[in-house]
Image (cartoon, helix red, strand yellow):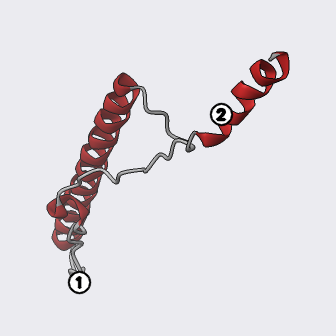
Amino acid sequence: MRTLILALPIILTACDKPTEYVEVAPDIPAETLTPCPISDRQVSTVKDLAALATEHLRAAECANGKIEAIKQILDKENSSAAQSGIGRG
Protein backbone atom coordinates (compact mmCIF):
# COMPACT_ATOMS: atom_id res chain seq x y z
CA MET A 1 0.00 0.00 0.00
CA ARG A 2 2.81 2.42 0.86
CA THR A 3 4.42 1.79 -2.56
CA LEU A 4 1.14 2.63 -4.28
CA ILE A 5 0.85 5.89 -2.34
CA LEU A 6 4.40 6.88 -3.30
CA ALA A 7 4.00 5.88 -6.95
CA LEU A 8 0.53 7.38 -7.48
CA PRO A 9 1.66 11.06 -7.73
CA ILE A 10 4.32 10.12 -10.27
CA ILE A 11 1.81 8.18 -12.35
CA LEU A 12 -0.80 10.95 -12.21
CA THR A 13 1.62 13.73 -13.19
CA ALA A 14 2.72 11.72 -16.20
CA CYS A 15 -0.86 11.82 -17.50
CA ASP A 16 -1.12 15.59 -17.42
CA LYS A 17 -0.57 17.31 -20.76
CA PRO A 18 1.89 20.22 -20.68
CA THR A 19 0.36 23.67 -20.90
CA GLU A 20 0.90 25.12 -24.34
CA TYR A 21 1.02 28.89 -24.78
CA VAL A 22 0.31 30.39 -28.17
CA GLU A 23 1.56 33.90 -28.76
CA VAL A 24 -0.99 36.06 -30.54
CA ALA A 25 0.17 38.92 -32.73
CA PRO A 26 -1.40 42.25 -31.77
CA ASP A 27 -3.85 43.86 -34.17
CA ILE A 28 -2.02 46.81 -35.74
CA PRO A 29 -4.01 48.80 -38.31
CA ALA A 30 -2.68 48.62 -41.87
CA GLU A 31 -2.52 52.42 -42.08
CA THR A 32 0.02 52.42 -39.25
CA LEU A 33 2.29 50.05 -41.16
CA THR A 34 2.41 52.10 -44.36
CA PRO A 35 5.56 54.16 -44.92
CA CYS A 36 5.46 57.92 -44.54
CA PRO A 37 6.10 59.76 -47.82
CA ILE A 38 9.49 61.42 -48.20
CA SER A 39 9.90 64.28 -50.62
CA ASP A 40 12.26 63.94 -53.56
CA ARG A 41 12.18 67.67 -54.29
CA GLN A 42 15.18 69.06 -56.15
CA VAL A 43 16.78 71.99 -54.35
CA SER A 44 17.85 74.96 -56.42
CA THR A 45 17.17 77.89 -54.08
CA VAL A 46 17.17 78.57 -50.37
CA LYS A 47 13.37 78.65 -50.51
CA ASP A 48 13.36 75.10 -51.97
CA LEU A 49 15.76 74.02 -49.24
CA ALA A 50 13.45 75.40 -46.55
CA ALA A 51 10.46 73.66 -48.14
CA LEU A 52 12.40 70.38 -48.32
CA ALA A 53 13.45 70.67 -44.69
CA THR A 54 9.81 71.27 -43.71
CA GLU A 55 8.66 68.25 -45.73
CA HIS A 56 11.32 66.05 -44.13
CA LEU A 57 10.29 67.29 -40.68
CA ARG A 58 6.67 66.37 -41.41
CA ALA A 59 7.76 62.92 -42.64
CA ALA A 60 9.74 62.39 -39.44
CA GLU A 61 6.77 63.49 -37.34
CA CYS A 62 4.57 61.07 -39.31
CA ALA A 63 7.00 58.20 -38.67
CA ASN A 64 7.34 59.07 -34.98
CA GLY A 65 3.55 59.18 -34.65
CA LYS A 66 3.26 55.71 -36.15
CA ILE A 67 5.98 54.40 -33.83
CA GLU A 68 4.11 55.86 -30.85
CA ALA A 69 0.84 54.27 -32.03
CA ILE A 70 2.51 50.86 -32.33
CA LYS A 71 4.10 51.32 -28.89
CA GLN A 72 0.70 52.09 -27.36
CA ILE A 73 -0.82 49.00 -28.99
CA LEU A 74 2.00 46.78 -27.73
CA ASP A 75 1.85 48.31 -24.23
CA LYS A 76 -1.90 47.68 -24.15
CA GLU A 77 -1.34 44.07 -25.25
CA ASN A 78 1.36 43.57 -22.60
CA SER A 79 -0.78 45.06 -19.83
CA SER A 80 -3.80 42.93 -20.77
CA ALA A 81 -1.58 39.83 -20.89
CA ALA A 82 -0.15 40.68 -17.48
CA GLN A 83 -3.64 41.16 -16.03
CA SER A 84 -4.79 37.80 -17.38
CA GLY A 85 -1.69 36.11 -15.95
CA ILE A 86 -0.14 35.18 -19.25
CA GLY A 87 3.62 35.69 -19.37
CA ARG A 88 5.63 36.47 -22.49
CA GLY A 89 8.93 34.81 -23.11
The vertical placement of 52 against 25, above or below, is below
Residue drawn where x is 70% and y is 25% of the image: 9
Q: What residue type is labelled 1?
A: Gln
Q: In this view, does 24 lie to the left or right of 6?
A: left
Q: Considering depth in this image, is 36 or 18 the residue closer to the camera?
A: 18
**Could you say whether the residue bearing mark 1 is in a helix, strand or loop?**
loop
79 above or below 33? above
Q: Under tag 2, what secondary structure?
A: helix
Q: Earlier in the sequence, mark 1 or mark 2?
A: 2
Residue on which disc 1 sits:
42
Label count reads 2
Which numbered mark, 1 or 2, is in the foreground of this view?
A: 2
Q: What is the C-alpha distance between the residues marked 1 and 2? A: 71 Å
Task: Tell me the quarter of the picture where residue 31 sits.
Answer: bottom left
Give coordinates of residue 13: x percent, y percent.
65, 34
Farthest-out residue, front: 1
Q: Mark 2 — residue?
A: 13
Q: Which amino acid does label 2 sit on?
A: Thr
Residue that appears at 17% across and 64% down = 30
Q: What residue appears at the point 23 percent right and 52 percent down from the top-left corner?
A: 27
Q: Would you place residue 12 above or below residue 70 in this image?
A: above
Residue 39: x, y in percent?
Answer: 21, 75
Q: Nearer the viewer, residue 53 or 48?
A: 53
